[in-house]
Structures are given as structure tokens and as C-alpha cells.
Image (tube, rainbow, N blue to C red):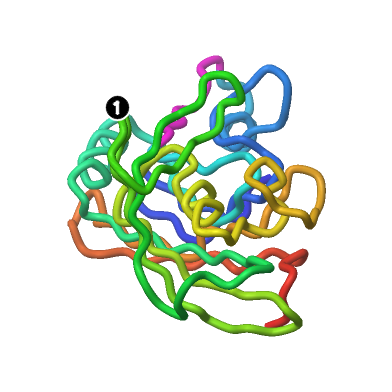
């Protein structure tokens, strides 16, 4: 099943749980496979259309938009590529970032050996600039909850940048966290997403409730 946050003409916004990938995979559960099963009509011989507009890492939870028509996918892809969307994330770390509020800028390259991103503070060959803004939401029980707004969309950007700043996301062992949350779960959640309606162009905002395993009390 898919936890639907909001839906409109040709699109559906869901709250993706951690532990499942976005795109269909032969080894494990995915959002695409669930959507295909959920939207399948009884007796239909043709599979329903499931358009992947954007992605969240398997270990990341939160707001994700799917297209139910090709034309909707095209319009949403243009909006995402054209910078007409806004995403905010919530993350929890066991170490504080340098300031309660600020900006991180790195140059990311992808390590083909371990399939992780490497964040450098200076430009490097083939490095892609990655920038995010952060704000401390609360500090409790030796944990720090941040609101993260990525200004660029790079592979593993938030995970790699926070780790490079000395504050790996809780549960993200791949990027240096010493604390484990659960199987294929880290404390990174796509909390809110704003995008233009594919039909009317009016702004749509959705908010995804934090998961039950969130490590810091509300």
C-alpha cells in the first residue's frame, strides 16, 4: 500500500517509508511496484502508468510525487528541472553542525567502488557543486534536529555534506554514523515539497509526517 498525502489530476503525492526504493527492482520492495499493484484495474490487460518524477534513497522517507499520465510526467519533470520546486528535509545528528543556521557548499564526486558520494571543500576534477541551507529545529537528549533545504540536487547530497561537516545523519553508517536506527533506515526525511500543479500551475504544498521511529521526541 501507499500512504497518500494528496492527489490531483494525473499525480499522487505519497509518504514513502524508509526501506523501499523508488524505482522497481528485482530484489526488493519499491514504490513503483506498489503503485503498479495498487493502481491495477481488475480485469485490465494493460499495466497502469507510473511515472517517476524524482527519487528518494531507499533509506530515506518522506514526500514523493508520482505521475499517473505521461503528459503529467513531462510537465512535472520540467518544473523540477527548472527549479520551480522547493524541498525541505528533516535530519537528526548526534553532533552539531558548525552554527545553528548556515549554508554548506561542497564539490561532490561519486566513488564507483562503494557507490557513495565524496564531498570536497574545494573544486575537484569532475566534481559537481552541491549547496544546502540548514537550520537547527531543536536540540534534545544530545541529539540535533535540523531543517535542510538543498539548493542543488546531487547524488547523496545531504548525506555526504552533513558527514563532511562532521555531523553524519543518525543511522547512516555508510557515511560515518556510529548509531544505528534500524534496517535500511536513517534519520533523513523529506518533510515538505512544493511544486506547480501540472494543470493550473498553482503552487501545491504537501507535508509528510515524521516516521514513528524518529529518534528525537517532538
Q: Residue at coordinates 72% horizontally, 27% vertically from top-left?
A: 28
Residue at the image point whose x is 53% and y is 72% from the top: 146
Q: Badge 1 is on which residue? A: 125
Q: Is residue 90 above or below residue 30?
A: below
Q: Residue 36 sits in which quadrant?
A: top right
Query: Is residue 218 a member of the stretch shown in magenta?
Result: no
Residue 184 falls in which quadrant of the image? top right
Indicate left or right for 180 with 174 as reference.
right
Q: Is residue 5 above or below residue 16?
A: below
Q: Position of residue 92 (x, y in %)?
A: 63, 67
Residue 155, x across and y down, in percent: 44, 37
In front of the other: 64 or 166: 166
Question: What kind of secondary structure does the magenta stretch mostly adopt?
Answer: loop
What is the x, y in percent for residue 23? 54, 29
- Circle 1: is it few (<14), some (14-19), or many (20+) Cα within 10 Å? few
Front in this rendered view, residue 144 or 54: 144
Amino acid at each position: 500500500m501507499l500512504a497518500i498525502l494528496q492527489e490531483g489530476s494525473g499525480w499522487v503525492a505519497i509518504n514513502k517509508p524508509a526501506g523501499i526504493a523508488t524505482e522497481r527492482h528485482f530484489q526488493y520492495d519499491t514504490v513503483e511496484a506498489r503503485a503498479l499493484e495498487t493502481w491495477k484495474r481488475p480485469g485490465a490487460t494493460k499495466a497502469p502508468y507510473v511515472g517517476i518524477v524524482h527519487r528518494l534513497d531507499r533509506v530515506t522517507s518522506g514526500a514523493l510525487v508520482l505521475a499517473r499520465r505521461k503528459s503529467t510526467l513531462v510537465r512535472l519533470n520540467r518544473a523540477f528541472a527548472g527549479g520551480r520546486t522547493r524541498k525541505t528535509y528533516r535530519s537528526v545528528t548526534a553532533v552539531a553542525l558548525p552554527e545553528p543556521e548556515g549554508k554548506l557548499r561542497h564539490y561532490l564526486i561519486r566513488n564507483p567502488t562503494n557507490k557513495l558520494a565524496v564531498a570536497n571543500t574545494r573544486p575537484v576534477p569532475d566534481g559537481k557543486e552541491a549547496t544546502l541551507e540548514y537550520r537547527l529545529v531543536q536540540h534534545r537528549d544530545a541529539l540535533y534536529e535540523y531543517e535542510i533545504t538543498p539548493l542543488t540536487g546531487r547524488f547523496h547530497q545531504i548525506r555526504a555534506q552533513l558527514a563532511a561537516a562532521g555531523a553524519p545523519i543518525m543511522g547512516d553508517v555508510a557515511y560515518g554514523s556510529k548509531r544505528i536506527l534500524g534496517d535500511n533506515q536513517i534519520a533523513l526525511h523529506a518533510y515538505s515539497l512544493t511544486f506547480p500543479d501540472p494543470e493550473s500551475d498553482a503552487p501545491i504544498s504537501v507535508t509528510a509526517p515524521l516516521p514513528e521511529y524518529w529518534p528525537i521526541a517532538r
